[in-house]
Image: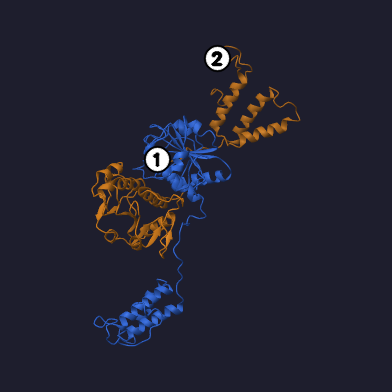
Chain colours: A orange, B blue
Amino acid sequence: MAGTNSERELLTEGPAIILAYPQLGENIGMVARAMANFGLSELRLVNPRDGWPSEKARSAASRADHVIDGAKLYGSLEEAIADLNFVYATTARDRDGYKPVRSPIVAARTLRQRFRGGEAIGIIFGRERTGLTNEEVALADEIVTFPVNPAFASLNLAQAVLLMSYEWMKTGMDSEEETSFQAIAQRPATKEHLQGLFDHLEDALEARNYFRSADKKPKLVENLRAVLTRPSFTESEIQVLRGVISSLDRFTRENPRGSGAPAGRSRKVQGGGDND
Amino acid sequence: MAGTNSERELLTEGPAIILAYPQLGENIGMVARAMANFGLSELRLVNPRDGWPSEKARSAASRADHVIDGAKLYGSLEEAIADLNFVYATTARDRDGYKPVRSPIVAARTLRQRFRGGEAIGIIFGRERTGLTNEEVALADEIVTFPVNPAFASLNLAQAVLLMSYEWMKTGMDSEEETSFQAIAQRPATKEHLQGLFDHLEDALEARNYFRSADKKPKLVENLRAVLTRPSFTESEIQVLRGVISSLDRFTRENPRGSGAPAGRSRKVQGGGDND
């Protein structure tokens, strides 16, 4: 397959991207970069207006050299798709025809299914300004169109390729929630640790008469515990919070830690008491 | 909201796009175009390196003037997100942290849900070359990262904005199969019309001894009917096919239609017999 390069660990499988009569070398380069971003590599060019090879294309490709080097040149769109089994045409305009029209996500799923079944597949993109003619669209099996703002529907060529390449890559993932890296797993602290935080804070507040009267205290405690329960603090977060409480509880602005003045009450602080 | 323009029928709702320290005016322009393509309009710029306003940005925006004109300038990322309730940071690099990491589709759904709940939302994108610093990422609620080719992961700034804008627009659609235009509805012909095609063709073939012998005929007819049934031809397609059969049946290369020679058999052709 054109564009594969076994020296680098690159994803290179998937549909051929066929540019019918592209105009600017820069755009071809940006197409190559977008393809490489999402693991495609087989680029087919039908009569690029400004010639081929193109230094402007190579420069705009931002080191997607394997795509540029592997690009194949064709004299007509018919030749460019001759060896393929199933082909989409991309268009932004209503063609008023009988060919099935698909969204990118449905088109990508169809391509993935056919690819897994061993079919050679491709996606055709038209000229920058005018897109594909009706005759060119007629060569494809189905149409794919993008859900754009009706008042501002003109997608840049490379961006149209990017969207289809992106949808293609997504169909190869186990789930649409998958990401290439993950947050470090965080487990909420056990209730024992949470209770330790409640006790610590309520003791410090009690000493300051925060709860005013015995009959008001239960409701105030309930509210406080609700506030501290909702975030599902981890054990290390609770350590940080207890350090904060200890600092506020044991020292004053006038007599900060290390000032030599007596540290108020000498309550032994559990856990992260030295984090303050 | 910045960037809305009630004179044009534009989709303009959705998350603010915040570019932190963008470098090239061209890239800001391409971001504006991508936003406009998918109905976003609120662009916030934190200290663009090459200044603002920028003619290069306006030119690259390809008439997304409402986005460029509405862009707001900020001196720091903190200021740029001060009025927002929920913010994503985009990054391609594993941050080795505790912040939740989401795929674009999950992030877009979360944004849509919060937007519907009345929250002011935004997505932060970093500098072209180096992205966001850890301190900048820390200002966001969650991280969104793109499912790229691990060996070629560097997305162009405008393309990263495009993907998030596209996923945003998709979350506003009734279904992921929705397209802005449809193929003309096609209904398979009734079985009576299909049977008419069978009769017409089989009669023409019988007259030419296509079926060889009576014992071979049933299997050949079965095969022929299977071939003609599978495509689910419409009534108008069957008319076309019957016109083709009539032409082949009634005329020869030596005596084509209109040549004045007798038209062979004078069988009256049902339906589209004049389409040949």
Nearest the eye: A170 or B215: A170
Q: Is residue B225 left or right of residue B210?
A: right
Residue A20 is left or right of residue A245, and the answer is left
Disc 2, SS: loop
Q: Quadrant of residue A44?
A: bottom left
Instruction: Tell me the chain of label 2.
Output: A
Residue B9 on image: x %, y %: 50, 49
Q: Quadrant of the C terminus of chain B?
A: bottom left
Question: Where is residue B6 drawn, in percent x and y?
Answer: 52, 45
Q: Are marks 2 and 1 in contact (CB under 8 Å)?
A: no
Looking at the rendering, which quadrant does residue B268 occupy?
bottom left
Image depth: mark 2 or mark 1 in front: 1
User: How far from the left and from the top, in percent, is residue B86?
Assistant: 53, 38
Q: Amino acid at mark 2?
A: Gly
Residue type at numbered disc 1: Arg
How many circles with numbers are drawn on the protein? 2
Category of crowding for the residue at label 1, using alpha-carbon neighbours closer than 10 angstroms: few (below 14), some (14–19), many (at least 20)? many
Q: Which residue is mark 1?
A: B58
**Image vertical order of residue B262 relative to residue A254, above or below:** below
Q: CA distance from mark 2 to mark 1?
A: 59 Å
Pick the front one: B125 or B91: B125
Q: Which residue is mark 2?
A: A258
Secondary structure category for the residue under label 1 = helix
